[in-house]
Structures are given as C-alpha cells and as structure tokens.
Image (cartoon, helix red, strand yellow):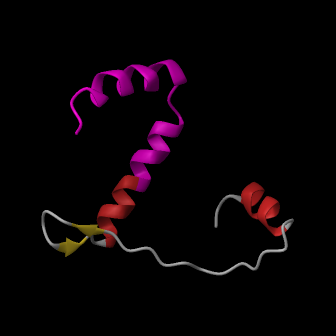
Amino acid sequence: MNNTGLLQYKSGWGTQERIIKYYRYDLQKEAFVCQTSLQTNGRLNKILQKMPIPFLTLIGTVLYRHIG
C-alpha cells in the first residue's frame, strides 16, 4: 500500500485494488505469529534497506552458512 510505483504499475494491467490479509503460523510454537512480531520485522527491513549493498552481501554470506 505504501509503494506508489508498484500500485501504478499494477493498475496499468487493469487490476482492482483490495486489501489482502496475511497470517503467519509458527509450526514450532503451533500458534499464529502476533502482529507485533510482524511489525518488528518491518522495522528490521527498513534498517536493512538503508545499508550499502556490499555490507548486505557480507551479512548474507556469513549468515546463510548457519541457517537451515
């Protein structure tokens, strides 16, 4: 909803704008993830968007070895 460029692009395809609700389920906790957790991820995304690409590449290289 905050990305006006994307909204403009999609409206060019004759789409209709509507709100889609997303829910996340944590399989380990067997419960839905609360909204505050999702907002925390949003703050982290805003921080990461402002970081230089070489720094993000370094972070990804180091962290992906330890995930999964």
Choose top left, top right, bottom left or bottom right for residue 36: bottom left
Foreground residue among 64 and 5? 64
Image point (39%, 19%), residue name: 58
Q: Count up the numbered dots.
A: 0
Image point (18%, 74%), residue name: 31
Choose top left, top right, bottom left or bottom right for residue 13: bottom right
The correct choice, above or below, for 67 with respect to 58 in the image is: below
Residue 26: % across, % down: 22, 66
Check the picture and name the quadrant holding the N terminus. bottom right
Judged left or right of residue 31, residue 6 is: right
The correct choice, above or below, for 10 with respect to 46 in the image is: below
Residue 51: % across, % down: 50, 29
Judged left or right of residue 1, residue 27 is: left
Image point (12%, 67%), residue name: 29
**Magenta part mainly helix, strand or loop?**
helix
Judged left or right of residue 38, residue 52 is: right
The single residue placed furthest to the front in the displayed view is 68
Check the picture and name the quadrant holding the C terminus. top left
The magenta span reads 42-68
The correct choice, above or below, for 62 with respect to 4 in the image is: above
Residue 45: % across, % down: 45, 46
Judged left or right of residue 38, residue 49 is: right
Image point (73%, 57%), residue name: 6
Whether the magenta-drawn stretch holds residue 4 is answered as: no
Residue 15: % across, % down: 78, 75
